[in-house]
Amino acid sequence: EAGVVQSPRYKIIEKKQPVAFWCNPISGHNTLYWYRQNLGQGPELLIRYENEEAVDDSQLPKDRFSAERLKGVDSTLKIQPAELGDSAVYLCASSPRGRLKETQYFGPGTRLLVL
Amino acid sequence: KQEVTQIPAALSVPEGENLVLNCSFTDSAIYNLQWFRQDPGKGLTSLLLIQSSQREQTSGRLNASLDKSSGRSTLYIAASQPGDSATYLCAVIGNQFYFGTGTSLTVIP
């Protein structure tokens, strides 16, 4: 069974440029999560999807961040414009039904560097 | 908001030593607690999940304990090996996953 797939793995951009990350969850998993992990810190939730609906986006900086999961499968996270402080690893995770007693399965992440 | 702390932040031990990693949390109203391993440049791999009604879970050389009332969990690694070198994260599951900052473990051959 394929795991969570993310692309690109690395991205270097100049500040004020846009950037997008893509995630394909494990087949059949209804719930998809985007996390941001700053250097030396644990991941922090940005947004959670149940199928195509964003059910928790309270920690997503909505002035510059947006996300979509149009068909309830893969998802895109976008930053526009990027700032220096956005440099981090962006992790995608999925779980079968999004119940809190389930484990989450993580992708390898996209490492973003904003210059 | 749930605060999760992991001590120590970094640990270096010789191969074969037994070791304990600590995780503490501020809100005892949790569903589960989970320990993850993160290798450089990679995502998180689940090691052990302890449900709130359980006190411990074991997998191979790993044993995780949970004391909800005191807001603490420990991950015990027996007979450490160089391949155990990684960052270990605990996550407390309440209304979402709350991660600690991790313990970076180096096992010296």
Image (cartoon, grey):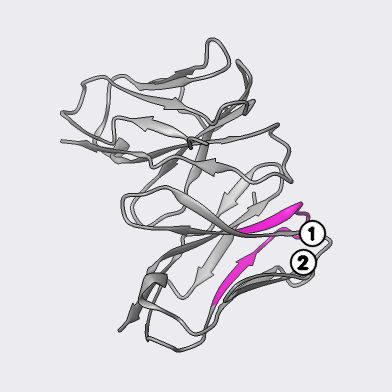
Which quarter of the figure is the C terminus of chain A placed in? top left
Indicate the secondary structure of the residue bearing disc 2. loop
Q: Residue at x 78, y 70 (%)?
A: B55
Q: Are marks 2 and 1 on the same chain?
A: yes
- Using the rendered view, name the quadrant where residue A82 is placed: top left
Give the camera-side residue of B52 and B60. B60
Given the current orientation, which residue lies at the most extreme right position? Answer: B53
Q: Earlier in the sequence, mark 2 or mark 1?
A: 1
Disc 1: which residue: B52
Residue A50 percent across, percent down from the top left: 65, 23
Q: Which residues are magenta?
A: B21-34
Query: Left or right of A103: which side holds B86?
Result: left
Q: CA distance from mark 2 to mark 1?
A: 7 Å
- Using the rendered view, name the quadrant where residue A99 is placed: top right
- Graded by Cα atoms within 10 Å as few (under 14), some (14 to 19) or many (20 or more), the crowding at tag 2 reads many
Query: Left or right of A24: which side holds B106?
Result: left
Indicate the secondary structure of the residue bearing disc 1. loop
Q: Where B92 sits versus A10, above or below?
A: below
Given the current orientation, which residue lies at the most extreme front position? Answer: A1
Residue B68 - label: 2
Give the camera-side residue of B29 and A98. A98
Residue B33 percent across, percent down from the top left: 67, 58
Label 2 close to label 1 by CB (< 8 Å): yes
Q: Which amino acid is tagged 1?
A: Ser
Residue B63 percent across, percent down from the top left: 64, 74
